[in-house]
Amino acid sequence: MGPCLVPNSPREDGVRWVSRAIGWGSRVGLLALTASTWSTSVRAAPLPVITDKVYLDCKIANYTEESVGTNRGATGSGRLVIGLYGKDSPESVKRFLEVLSGDGLTHPNYVNSQFTKINTESGLLEMEKVRRLNKVKLAGGDAFEYDGNLLPVYSNPILESNDLRHDRRGLLTRNKLTSTPEFGITMRDNSPNLDGFHCVFGEVMEASSFAVLDAIAAIPTYTYTTSTGYGGKEKTSQVDSLAESWFSAQREFYVGAGKAFGDGRAVDLRGKLLRRVTITRGGKL
């Protein structure tokens, strides 16, 4: 027969203490191993390498000064300094640099292109199509031309992917399904809904550049609601609020239906910037 332990005896307490110490030691060891593994995994994720440094000068329209002919940009106009990820997104960066250095005669350039919208769902600052770069029908298919010059390079989309996430403000990104050189800039700290169909290829750098983004974010945008209420009446009751919500939902439904049927007039204007933001110059640094 094995030794009999008297309840609450010093020996029994000692056995329990040793057992508990071993258990806690195992837990501490497991936590230390987990923390070590997590730390190693964090260190193992390198930051994207900046292979090229470029700039885009952006002008925010000042309608008062333009009306008297001075054509000077409004407060907030300035330079976006950008770092490009040529190792993580080589094809996207190549296309961007080609347009950045385009002569504007036979090949497109970003000059005079505009940022026109901040997407209400993703928070993406979107660029309209590059000026004078147009889609045309050729031999039963789609092709692109620039001032009458066919550009076969835009025939197929750049289906480029990487592991970079849209987890910071100021990231340059492009839609993987497009072949043209338009791009967007993230205006939120996290936009996970862009991770599926967009490819990050660069970042905005320097505090002065983020001041330009702040100025763009402060521009009023188009919405489906009004500041006064439905029908232009003063918003004084719950009835006005309900009517305005119904108007917004109805408009959203018809825009969606129009897009589904291919109606080119069906455009979701929510988030459209109510002042022009134009690229006036760009180049390498």
Image (cartoon, rainbow, N blue to C red):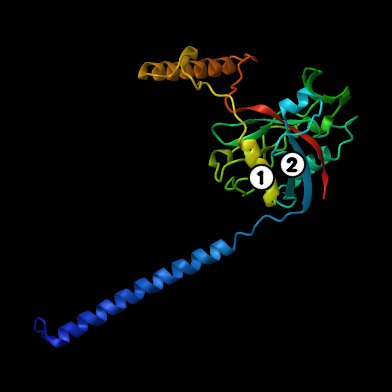
Q: Earlier in the sequence, mark 2 or mark 1?
A: 2
Q: In which quarter of the image is the N terminus?
A: bottom left
The residue to which callout 1 is attached is: 211
Q: Residue at the location (41% across, 20% down)?
A: 241
Left or right? Give the position of 118 relative to 29: right
Residue 202 appears in the picture as rendered: no
Front in this rendered view, residue 71 or 79: 71
Q: Is residue 250 above or below residue 206?
A: above
The residue to which callout 2 is attached is: 78
Left or right? Give the position of 151 relative to 238: right
Circle on res. 247? none
Residue 56 coordinates in the image, percent (x, y): 77, 41
Asked if the residue at tag 1 contacts the one at tag 2, i.e. Cβ–Cβ closer than 8 Å, the answer is: yes
Amino acid type, mark 1: Ala
Q: Residue at the location (64% across, 14% down)?
A: 265
Quadrant of residue 9 within the rendered picture: bottom left
Q: Distance between the residues labelled 2 and 1?
A: 9 Å
Quadrant of residue 134 within the rendered picture: top right
Q: Is residue 42 above or below residue 17?
A: above
Residue 99 coordinates in the image, percent (x, y): 82, 37
